Image: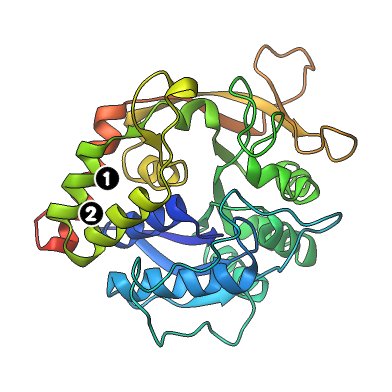
Amino acid sequence: MSRQRIIIDTDPGVDDAIAILLALASPELEVLGITAVAGNVPLTATLANACKIVALSGRQVPVFAGAPGPLMGKQVFGRYAHVGAFSDDLMPATDLQPQPDSAVSFIIRQARLAAESGEPLTLCALGPLTNLALALVQDPLVSKGIGRIVTMSCAFTALGHRVPWAEFNIYADPHAAEVVFNSGVPLTVMPLDMTFQALVTAEHILGFEQQGGAVGRAVAALLRRFDRSDIKRYGREGGPVHDATTIGWLLAPQLFSGVQSRIGVATSGPTAGYTWADFHGKLEEPANAEVMQTVDEAGFLGLLSARLATYGGHAI
């Protein structure tokens, strides 16, 4: 079976953790490395969390330290920044350490190798786009070695969740987003408009806990500790696992539908981080992204449940 080679750039984060564990449970994917960036929590915590996640999975995947802050402007953190690294009662302690090389150097090296081999890799961006922007700016060959960037970012009709006007990953570094959006690398975007459609309920969480072994128990504990429920906003019980949709799309793109569009970002002013999509061709500019608009909720959550269950010894 041909495996899709990916790098996961991330700021774990509960739903980042679920996305990473989903990827590491999927034989269709070869995860070349995990590159951490400051975002939901400071870089020291995202690194610690990434190492714990990889160790818990039992897989051998290197972890790299990336940018400690945005390209420009003030640093902002996620809703649970005060929590920092996952406590040992949520995810077991580990001796796994990050690699000595930097995340940006790793991305550049892997992208160059991919370009030279003629087999571009996929970059899954689950956090602020700082690491990727730095790699693209530092070496022009990077854009040739990345066949696609799949990013959980942006909000168009759903507006924001960290601030009213912006999705957090863009809000945390809008200048990096501008670099990535204009890089020429094909983009697949998982915006809040779509991720809000797939909600994990208490029943799903119980299933993770009962079927997924130590990994499933950790995922259940994270989801219960950091409850995503918001009935007023979503209109029903449950909470989204935003970042996991990026991996879900790689594994089962038929569960998603989207449209080609030109997207852009405001980099300054009181609404910095605001993203727009020219769905109706008003600008007469070529599309730079495929924006996902719908997801088969049952199909996606069934896929997630089945893959997490493999950690408990269940077959795919």
- Tell me if mark 2 has few (under 14), some (14-19) or many (20+) residues whose alpha carbon lies within 10 angstroms of its own: many
Which is more toward the observer, 205 or 250?
Answer: 205
Q: Is residue 239 above or below residue 73?
A: above
Q: Is residue 52 above or below residue 211?
A: below
Q: Residue 309 at what x, y percent from top left?
A: 16, 54
Q: Amino acid at mark 2?
A: Leu
Q: Are marks 2 and 1 in contact (CB under 8 Å)?
A: yes
Residue drawn at point x = 34 percent, y = 49 percent:
224
The answer to which quarter of the image holds residue 43 is bottom right
Query: In the image, 265: left or right of 112?
Result: right
Residue 121 in percent (x, y) is at 50, 58
Label 2: which secondary element: helix
Q: Amino acid at mark 1?
A: Leu
Judging by the rendered image, the residue that carries numbered circle 2 is 308
One can see residue 100 in this view: yes
Neighbor class of circle 1 (other Cα within 10 Å; few <14, some 14-19, many 20+) is many
